[in-house]
Structures are given as C-alpha cells and as structure tokens.
Amino acid sequence: MRTLFYPALFLALALGCAAAPPQPAQAAPAFKLPVQDKAKSIAETVYNTWRVSMQRGNESSWRSSTSTARQTKIRNMIVSQKQAFPGDLFRKQPPPPALENFRFVGALAGAQGQTMACTYLGSLQLGDGAPAPNAYVLQLVCERGSWKLDQANFFRLDKLPKVLKRLEAKDLSVLQEQDGFRPYASVPAAPAACKAPELIGKVFVDCPGRSVELRINGISTHSFADERRADVISGGLRRGQNNISYHINPVAGQPHPSFAIGIFVMPETPGNRPVCVFDHILDAEDKAEGGSFTFSIDNAAIGSMSPKYTGPKPEPLHAVPLKPKKP
C-alpha cells in the first residue's frame, strides 16, 4: 500500500471527513458480521460508482450511488454558502482515493441489515501533515433494495497503536468496540431542504471530552464528539434575531479541559473578515451546561467585517460572562 496525499478538506463537500479518532463504544448493540466477501463486493461497487461520478461530474450517477439523506445535506451545505448546486459539488474537487490503495479489514451490518460499515486500512497524508496510518470507513445504507454510500471517514491511527495492530491482524472484534467502525443503528432520515441564506454562517465547536448536539434557527442540526470542528450553518443566518439551542454531555473516562462554541457571520466581500455574534467559552474548571439562546445580528456587526470599519467593536452575545484575562 502506497502513501496517498489529499488536501485536508478533500471530502468536506463530497461526504464529510472525520478527523477525530474512533472512541470506545459505550454500549455495543448487536451489530452482525455479514458475509465478508459479499460486503466487500457491495462496498467497492458502490464506492467506485460514486468515485467515478465525482471524477466525471456525472450528477445522475452521483445520485444513484449516494444516500438520499447525504444528497440533501450536501445540497444544503452548498446552497448555504450561496453557491450553485449541483455544479459546485463537482467543481475543483480532487479525485477521491482509490480503494486499491487500501486493504480491506472487515464489515459490520446494523439496522436489521439495512446499514453497513466497511473498514479499510492504508497510509495517508492529509494536508501538510506527515504520512500516517489511517482507517478509511465507508458507511452504506440500503434504500429500496439498493445500497448507497452515505459517508466515507478517515481516522488517524498513529496514536492508537493497539487498535492499528488489531486492524492489521484483521481482528474484527475491534470493529464492535470502537464507535467509528460501527454502522448506523438506523437509516439516516433526510433533512428538509433549506432556503438560500440571507447571511452565510458557520458554527465552531471545540469540545474535548464532551459531546454536543446543537440546533440553529430550528433548521441546522449538528453533532460534535470530543473534537474541534467548524460546520456551515444550513440555511445560514439572518439580520435580526437568531436562536441556538444545544445539549452538552461529558464523554465517560475523558478529561474535560476548556470548551468553546462560536457562531460567525462569514464574509462575502473579498478582504472582509468573519464576525462572531455568539459565543460560549469556558475554562477547564467550569462546568459546561447547554441551553437555548437568542442573539441578534445588526448593521454594526455586519459593518465591522470591513477592514475600513472605525466604529466601536460589536460584542457577541456571551452565553456565560467572559472571565478577565489573567495578567
């Protein structure tokens, strides 16, 4: 297996690439081992169809190989950045990796055989980082008797040597023990199609040792687990009132250092900069509690995005008061 190089955001539009390592499962449901050769054949047929559709910009083939839920999520993400769908899905996308460069480890089936996760192993260089061993996990769902690709996630394994060793040995029991290798417990439901946004928005979450379930303006839903990530807000933000609600849960056995949520209006004019309109920032000693908040975006916040702005700096809504900086 040779080392592959891909930009860090390679799958952001196509499927969504996970950077956080798989976590030990809290309570292992009864996922089953399908016939491995058959599972491998299904996964590679679907994946290769999807891969060729991305390379050739073939919308019909892409739709036939991509789950309904993922199609809508991708459409919402593109529209929410005021881009054109499906044209911008295929524009300037690097080719997805070929499975021939990975070694098949094994598959698990869930949801009474309607979902499947197939794990591959290979060496990958993402962005400017050094080459590292990665698991490449394909999440598939069965819709009306036809298998479709929903996600393809990379997981770095250089800091999980025991997991890597077991995967190299094709120890399929490790697939049951780690959340990242397990299939969906149910077929994902497709979200509602969002409208074009008034303002482009992103939500940033840094939640080490915690999981966060979050909803913005009743439309855009997000899940974070022990990671640092920014997501496009489906449907964007609007001038005037917006709302956010979220639940925070500690991950058992993990330390709980500092924590942050931030909502930003993203610039559409070259040279402008993002502006934060909501934050929730905590130190390690603070307890992270969820809640529901309404925040406003006014002309001052929008104006402050320009480097020519000279007025007072607008403050975001703070979910908890900011602590004074230590001298």
Image: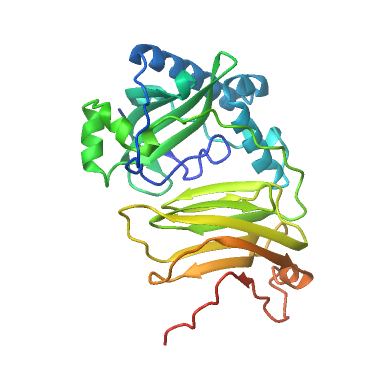
Instruction: Give 296 or 265, whichever is nearer the viewer.
Output: 296
Left or right: 55 with respect to 283? Answer: right
Farthest bottom residue in view: 327
The residue drawn where x is 55% and y is 77% is 321
Q: Front-most of 52 and 169?
A: 169
Q: Quadrant of residue 43?
A: top left
Q: Is residue 234 above or below residue 201?
A: above
Pinpoint residue 108: horizontal percent, then vertical percent. 37, 24
Q: Give above or below for 219 relative to 314.
A: above
Figure label count: 0
Query: Which quadrant is home to the N terminus?
Result: top left
- Quarter of the picture containing the C terminus is bottom left
Name the foreground residue: 59 vs 285: 285
At which x and y percent is residue 102? Answer: 35, 26
Expressed as whole percent of the image width and height from the top left, the position of residue 128 reads 40, 49
> Is residue 242 visible from the viewing direction of this image?
yes
Q: Which residue lies at the image location 48% right of the left edge and 56% below the top edge?
A: 248
In this rendered view, identify the residue nearer to me: 158 or 56.
158
Question: Vertically, is 137 above or below 313?
Answer: above
Give the residue drawn at x 51%, y 44%: 9
Residue 254: x %, y % from top left:
32, 55
Q: Is residue 30 left or right of residue 304?
A: left
